[in-house]
């Protein structure tokens, strides 16, 4: 009996989607922030755009060349999160309006960490002389 096409499981959100969502939620906040501190708003948008650019570069790179872009994305995400905390602490915006964006950035940060983490291969090496180091 012929069967219809197999249903594939729902696609896992990509890093690009996560970064795009964070960038989208950051834009309205940056526009409000631009009125009180335009330099901080520019830095925040530059850092968030850098996150998206590094993620795009990582997804386009060959598998062995992705890690540097992922680490660059981690650094840029950390910078954007720090700038967002600076904006809240200096009373340029309220935490209520910044928390959703902060959570999106932290989700992106965690996804980047998962993908940038090195995978250990193999088992621990045995000592050459048969003795353990602790002995």
Image (cartoon, rainbow, N blue to C red):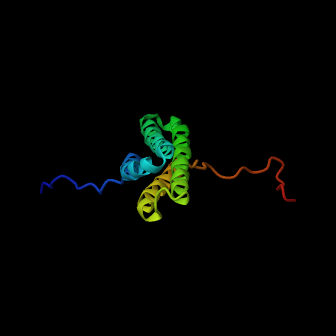
In the image, farthest residue toward the right: 135
Quarter of the rendering occupied by the C terminus: bottom right
Q: Quadrant of the N terminus?
A: bottom left
Measured from the top left, where is residue 31 in percent x and y? 38, 48
Q: Nearer the viewer, residue 111 or 93?
A: 93
User: Is 13 drawn above or below residue 97 in the view shown?
Assistant: above
Q: Residue 101: percent from the left, percent from the top?
A: 43, 56
Residue shown at the point (75%, 51%) measured from the top left:
126
Considering every residue shown, the one lying at the far front of the view is 36
x and y percentages locating residue 48 in the rendered image: 46, 45
Residue closest to the eye, 97 or 56: 97
Which residue is depicted at the point 83% across and 55% down?
Answer: 133
Give the residue furthest to the left: 1
What residue appears at the point 46 percent right and 62 percent down from the top-left corner? 94
- Give coordinates of residue 134: x percent, y percent: 84, 59
Quarter location, residue 8: bottom left
Count of number-bearing discs? 0
Nearest the camera: 29 or 36?
A: 36
Say whether residue 8 is left or right of residue 20.
left
């Amino acid at each position: 009996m012929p069967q219809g096409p197999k249903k594939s499981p729902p696609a896992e959100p990509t890093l690009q989607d996560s970064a795009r969502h964070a960038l989208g939620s950051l834009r309205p906040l940056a526009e409000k922030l631009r009125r009180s501190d335009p330099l901080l708003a520019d830095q925040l948008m530059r850092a968030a755009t850098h996150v998206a650019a590094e993620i795009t570069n990582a997804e386009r790179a060959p598998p062995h060349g992705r890690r540097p872009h992922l680490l660059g994305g981690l650094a840029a995400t950390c910078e954007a999160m720090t700038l967002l905390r600076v904006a809240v602490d200096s009373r340029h915006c309220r935490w209520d309006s910044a928390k959703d964006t902060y959570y999106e950035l932290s989700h992106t940060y965690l996804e980047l960490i998962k993908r940038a983490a090195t995978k250990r291969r193999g088992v621990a090496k045995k000592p050459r002389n048969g003795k353990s180091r602790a002995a």
